[in-house]
């Protein structure tokens, strides 16, 4: 799949105000400073569609982008260590769970993880929440250009081990990406295209 058009539609903190269109949505979420905005810009061939920042936690709203006029890319706030007040964090963490548990149009969530680091408890915990809530998701390992292929394989294996230790029967689908080099772009967009085709073929909506 090639992304020909990508346009910002709406930002808000109330799931009930998200677009009413019954188009498939793909939500991107991860810890602060995981490279989410850079990945979104790489996928959409735009430099400034999603705002990048040296300050972690800049995304604090549900951001909808209409892609090719037939699906939505949803940019969600990071979970974890964003430098915002406790009150603000409790508000946006609530609308994150509201989005995942109420948004019928959600086709798949992508949980972003910095491949440079060992398995982090907060990532495992978040994915456990997704699994227990029966929310379909994949893992996107980011910043693959920063470490060697051997270390990439080692860190992916460490995540598998952690997830199996937390009673996962199998590893969710995953992608290894680099926003700088474009690694994983084709595989990721092909996956989204396959899910979209299945949804549209069945013509069953959500």
Image: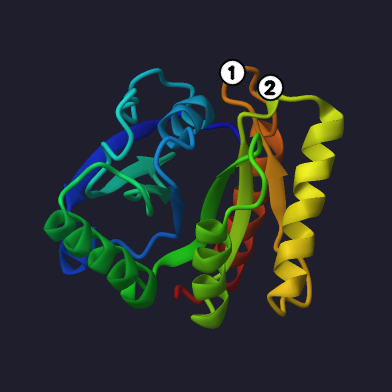
Quadrant the N terminus occupies: top right
Query: Circle 1 sits in a helix, a strand or a loop, which is it?
Result: loop
Q: 10 Å neighbourhood of mark 2: few (<14), some, or many (≥20)?
A: some
**Is residue 148 found left or right of 63 in the rendered image?**
right
Q: How is colour applied across the structure in the image?
A: rainbow
- In this view, which residue lies farthest toward the right? 150
Residue sitting at x 50%, y 59%? 122
- Is 59 above or below relative to 76? above
Q: Position of residue 23 (x, y in %)?
A: 40, 60
Q: What residue did someone put label 1 on?
A: 180
**Nearer to me, 15 or 53:** 53
Q: Quadrant of residue 171?
A: bottom right
How crowded is the residue under tag 1: few (<14 C-alpha within 10 Å), some, or many (20+)? Answer: few
Where is residue 196 shown, x and y percent of the image?
57, 57
Q: Note whether 150 is above or below 12 in the view shown.
A: above
Regarding mark 2 in the picture, which secondary structure is present there?
helix
| Camera sees residue 7 | yes
Do tag 1 and tag 2 residues touch (Cβ < 8 Å)?
A: yes
Q: Residue at x 76, y 48 (%)?
A: 156
Q: How many marks?
A: 2
Instruction: Point out which mark residue 145 bears.
Output: 2
Of residues 52 and 165, the one nearer the viewer is 165
198 shown above or below 169: above
Q: Position of residue 78 (x, y in %)?
A: 37, 49
Query: In the visual, does 150 lie left or right of 28?
Result: right
Q: Nearer the viewer, residue 21 or 51?
A: 51
Which is in the foreground here, disc 1 or disc 2? 2
Cα–Cα span, label 1 and label 2: 7 Å
Q: Position of residue 141 (x, y in %)?
A: 64, 42
């Amino acid at each position: 799949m090639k992304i020909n058009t990508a346009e910002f539609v709406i930002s808000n903190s109330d799931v009930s105000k998200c677009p009413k269109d019954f188009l498939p949505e793909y939500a991107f979420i991860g810890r602060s400073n995981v490279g989410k905005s850079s990945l979104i810009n790489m996928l959409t061939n735009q430099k400034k569609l999603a705002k990048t920042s040296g300050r972690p936690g800049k995304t604090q709203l549900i951001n909808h982008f209409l892609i090719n006029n037939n699906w939505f890319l949803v940019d969600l706030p990071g979970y974890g260590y964003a430098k915002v007040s406790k009150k603000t964090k409790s508000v946006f963490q609530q609308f994150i769970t509201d989005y995942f548990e109420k948004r019928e149009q959600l086709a798949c969530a992508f949980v972003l993880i910095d491949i440079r680091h060992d398995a982090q408890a907060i990532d495992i915990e978040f994915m456990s929440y997704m699994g227990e809530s029966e929310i379909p998701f994949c893992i996107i390992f980011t910043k693959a250009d920063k470490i060697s292929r051997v270390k990439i394989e080692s860190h992916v294996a460490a995540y598998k081990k952690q997830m199996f230790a937390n009673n996962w029967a199998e590893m969710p689908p995953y992608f290894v990406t680099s926003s700088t080099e474009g690694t994983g772009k084709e595989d990721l967009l092909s996956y989204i295209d396959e899910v979209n085709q299945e949804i549209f073929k069945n013509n069953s909506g959500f």
